Image (cartoon, rainbow, N blue to C red):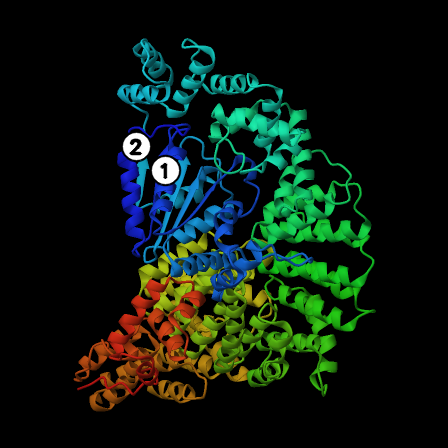
Amino acid sequence: MPAPLIERQEPLDALERLVRTCTVGAGALALVEGSAGIGKTRLLRELVARCLGSGDAEVLEASASELERGYPLGVVLRLLERATQADHDVADGLFRGHAALAKRVLRGQHEDSPSLNDEFALVHSLYWLVVNLADARPVVLVIDDIQWADEQSLRFLHYLTQRIHDLPVAVVLAVRTGDQAADGDTLTRLMLEAGLTIQLTELTREGTREFLTATLGVEENLDSLVDKAWTSTRGNPFLLREVTAATTQRGIRALPDSAPDGVTRSVNLRIQSLGPHAVALARAVSVLAGPTEVGAAASAAGLSIEDALVAADLLQCAQILDPEGGLSFHHPIIKSAVYARLSAQERIRLHRRAACLLHELAAPDEEVALHLLRTAPFSEPWVSPILRAAGRSAGRKGAPATAAVFLRRALDQDDLNAIDRGETLIALGIMEAAAGETESLVHLERALLLLAEPQPRARGMYALGQTLFRYGRSAEALTVFRRGADDFAASDRELSLRFEAGYLASAAYLVDRPKDAVERLEKLAPDLEDAPTLTPAERLILLHLAVYRAMSEPAAPDHAALALAALGDGLQLWHETSDGMTLSHAVLALTWAGSPSAAISVADRVLEDARQRGDSLIFAEMSLARAMAAYAKGDVRDAMADAQSAVIGMARGWKSTVPAPQGILAYCHLDRGETDEAATVLEEAEAGLREGPTATLNVWFYMARGRLRLVTDQYDLALDDFMKVGELLQRNGYTNPGYMLRPWRSQAALALHRLGRHAEAVEMVSQDIEDAERYQLPSTLGAALRTRAMLEGSPDPDLLHRAAEVLQAEDASSLELAETLLELGSAERRAGTRVKSRDTLRRAHDLAHRQGALALEERAHQELLAAGARPRRAAILGPDSLTPSEHRIADLMSQGHTSRQIAETLYLTMSTVEWHRRNIYRKLEVSSRDELRAAMSGQPLDIES
């Protein structure tokens, strides 16, 4: 018989109202808080019963458990498995689109090779699974004891609850206050999303009387019992249940102590009074997680089915076990009380028995492995494979730290053969690298002593090197790749070259790039440049040659041609997929070689592949490369959208080029006149500046901060930053003046000029002009010539004219051209040729507007006014009125992507995409996709009436 629901009608009504609101498309999170035993579980059960009774929604429920906190996504899997194990045709429809990745996890589909899934991609996929469920009918998700949930489940729930406000989805969570065993930060962030928070309090004295009357009936001495019970329990419903149970079994005076130890004693005394079979069954159920079949519990307890059924009936009548569903405790406190009384040896024995039983029942690997972790190692042929499989599964769910725990336990087994032990060590190294632990290379060395066969050695080494690289540990990745290149040089040239490519990719980010890297590259180059055909690995080496030359050698157009030849019109993407480490370098090589349009084309193809694969880390990496290419082209709007995608990716674990994404984003804010926003981005970036061998990447921070300080009149500090950029680039031999997309010497020259150090300023910018001519980089040359012109008392019009002519070249930066035309037009106005200046200033205004360079646009607007023109303000209609985010969405819509596909790709909600769509349609004055495509083709902007 369930406990009576007393003094809980108001919170129950509030929850029902929230659920009804959610079912019509206004999703929300409700949080039920309270101390242990306060009635959270009972309230949730009543809510579930009422929701099921109404039939208005799909109701999915789960409860977190202390013993399962090491089971990645364990709570979410239990929550969603019933809905996804329906008829296969229906279930398969739920996994459409980006929900497909979730299918592999929920259905237990996996490969044998070590892998590390992108956790965010999986969380995003699970979100779309819930969206698909809600497409069929409203969904109510109910989870009890969320404080014990695993970290991955908490992160999913946080992601979901931030995005359900336009979905028919209600999430109801119960959390025990004062016992937040889960990660405090994640749980706190989740709780802050609650639209309704209910704090359950103890029953009043009158409520206590009502509770006892309902459970014990009317007795002559009830007043005395009420006084004793309320004094002892302070109205805690669970403790009151113990009062009624004790009263029923041992008489009215046998009141349990309300302290934890007292509750534990009371519960165990009641169970002992039911006989040894009941004790054995209760202890077995305390070890087995979740509702358990009687047969399984009987085996774990060492009882016959008949004895277990009798014991279960006694425990249910005594309100120890729940009478509904499989065998589970009536309340988590009872389970904790029973488990707490087990001796250490008994726990080990029961967990071992549970592991053996669950293995026989073909339970999920991680479920079995959780029990194995609580036993001493023992020799059974299935134990090591289960632990290794659990490690792989945890890695695929984005839980590398948990995966490492399983794999370390597998290594404790004495029955691992040399090959299995070696592969397990490599898998452990991969997971440790992703988790930020430092033992990866130690485990690799141990593994290589055990692995004689080339393919397992190569597969493991490459995966480890790639993982280290993705997580920003380039120096360690370099060590792994160099070892692989040397190990296979004599036996497998193609494989050795693939490792060489990884080595070169890692070396590119290191201060004082290893001299060995350049020597190895130059040694390989002559045989490849003139080869009639190229293998995939040879293409990788040629791409790195193009990168190196683009950074360090003149004649940039030649390097762009080399990069395009190595890419082979998409052949390299086909061989490597977007997961390849070299493709982002190819985009950067083309950018630094003065071919940003080609770079953008390559980046778009790689990004589409990453979208199809659902890989948010690769998406972030390539978004940064595309942001740099777009900025080099002069498109501030596109560069900003890409840089924002890259910064978002950093929060999901991508670290390989931090802090470059924040640097490019700050560039864009500065070009839009948003100095406060740029300062905020850089403050956040400063906390993550690199130290040690990968500090070269800090150049992007220093360059952006130098530009910020320059526009805020902090000239001496700006100069310091620009000189740090130069020092780091020169240490690595990066002599390309266009490497930073804006020439650092020219920026330093402006700071020197403001400080009155004219001769030094001229010397600085003259070096840029010389280098830009040698490298044949029109954007850099034009920017340097403009800077040189601005160092005179009044800008030199001849130099400005020359700069503008240079910047007319194909693929030159329209942003640099706009700034040059602005300075030229201003000079013409000041020289008295106002009519002529208007034409020049119009062009500057038009270019700045089209590229989203709002700061330049505003300056051009003011200059036009001063020249006697009547320029229009920024467009409020048309393609040029779109924000960077709107422009990105409009582009995707015009390419034929549906709103859902855009939401999946850009990690937005459907309502956010639809909100942008409505704004886009309003600004473009269109009402259909066909009209949108026509509008996005663009027309010349008439800025003057």
The secondary structure type at the circle numbered 2 is loop
Discs 1, 2 touching: Cβ within 8 Å: yes
Q: Amino acid at mark 2?
A: Arg
Chain-order first, disc 1 or disc 2: 2
Residue under the point 29% across and 23% down: 207
The secondary structure type at the circle numbered 1 is helix
Residue 8, labelled with which disc? 2
The residue beneath circle 1 is 46
Q: Position of residue 613 (x, y in %)?
A: 54, 67
Position of the N terminus, as image quadrant, is top left
Q: Position of residue 213 (x, y in %)?
A: 32, 19
Say whether residue 721 is visible: no
Q: Amino acid at mark 1?
A: Glu
Numbered marks: total: 2
The span from disc 1 to disc 2 (Cα, nearest Å) is 10 Å
* Residue 195 drawn above or below residue 105: above
Furthest residue toward front: 306
- In front: mark 1 or mark 2? 1
Say whether residue 443 is visible: yes
* Residue 501 drawn above or below residue 935: above
Judging depth in this view, the residue of 88 and 15 nearest the camera is 88
- Structural crowding at the residue carrying mark 1, measured as other residues with C-alpha within 10 Å and reported as few (<14), some (14–19) or many (≥20): some
Q: Position of residue 559 (x, y in %)?
A: 59, 82
